[in-house]
Amino acid sequence: MTMVLRHRTSAFVLGREDSLDADRTFFVFTKDFGRIEVLGKSIRKIDSKLKGGIEVFSLSNIEFIQGKNKKTLTDAVFIKKFKNVFESTNMLETAHKISQLADNFIKGQEPDEKIWDLLTDVFEKLNNYQENNRGCQLIYPYFFWNFVSMLGYGPELSNCANCSAKLNPYELYFSSKEGGVICKICYTLNRNSIKVKSGVVKVLRLIIKKDWSILSKLKIENSMQESLNEVSDNYYSYLKSNFNGYLKNT
């Protein structure tokens, strides 16, 4: 008689996908196994005992069994519901962007305590902020830049990412190809870069330092926020296209 091996771990639910027979597959990042997919058999039925312990953007304690081709969910109990995330469209969109980013770039079963801590930290921040609070608009950039840094693709912000020269605060450009801020001379050789103000670079430095006490109090002008978003989105697109949506932890 073959013994069924059950695994139990804490899991953050990144997303889900429904299938036939009221089944639902959850894409989760777990504390002990990294990113995995678990199948909730008949979980969408009204009388399912599992549905009351797991949902998107929540922390749950889950139990699953490993089959030949898939993992099947056998138990789920909520640890933390981030209910406030669902209170506004902007907060929900931010939650989706964070989860999609993590799900797109984390492949394979490899636990990572730093990523686990970052995920839970940013969702605590998102859950605790109201939409009009200072710092709320910085939660996604905060996650993005620290996340890619943990995967080995953090930006160079101190010296020119191409020639290592000292940067002039009035002539700054961000090059996704070079992986950071470049000087004007290097910009003339690589015009596929974005001009940025020194204030944006300062915010990026605070983000990488995880200095949330200062970041949460900053009053970000719309133009600076737009510039920060542009740099973040451009770097995301570059990494995704050049690494086929897969970054290895380093």
Image (tube, helix red, strand yellow):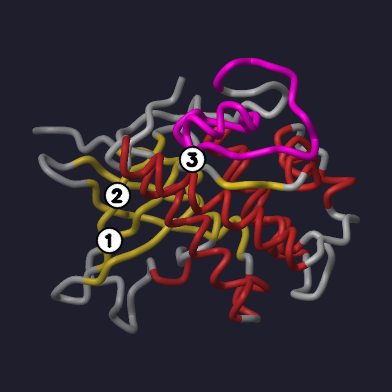
Let me know if residue 165 is in the magenta part. Answer: yes
Query: Of marks 3 and 1, which one's residue comes earlier in the chain?
Result: 1
**Residue at left offset 88%, top offset 61%:** 219
Looking at the image, residue 90 sits to the left or right of residue 133; the answer is: left
Q: Secondary structure at mark 1?
A: strand
Q: Callout 3: 10 Å neighbours few (<14), some, many (20+)?
A: few
Please state which of residues 197 and 141 is positioned toward the viewer in this rendering: 197
Looking at the image, residue 4 sits to the left or right of residue 184; the answer is: left
Q: Quadrant of residue 43?
A: bottom left
Question: Viewer-nearest of labels 3 and 1?
Answer: 3
Q: Mark 3 and mark 2: span between their CA atoms?
A: 42 Å
The three-letter amino acid code for the residue at tag 2 is Glu
Disc 3 + disc 1, Cβ < 8 Å:
no
Residue 164, how many percent across, how many down? 64, 15
* Residue bearing the label numbered 2: 37
Residue 63, how many percent across, how many down? 38, 47
Disc 1 + disc 2, Cβ < 8 Å:
yes
Looking at the rendering, the stretch of residues picked out in magenta corresponds to: 162-190
* Residue bearing the label numbered 3: 191
Q: Residue furthest top?
A: 164
Please state which of residues 217 and 187 is positioned toward the viewer in this rendering: 187
* Residue bearing the label numbered 1: 25
Residue 129, how many percent across, how many down? 78, 66
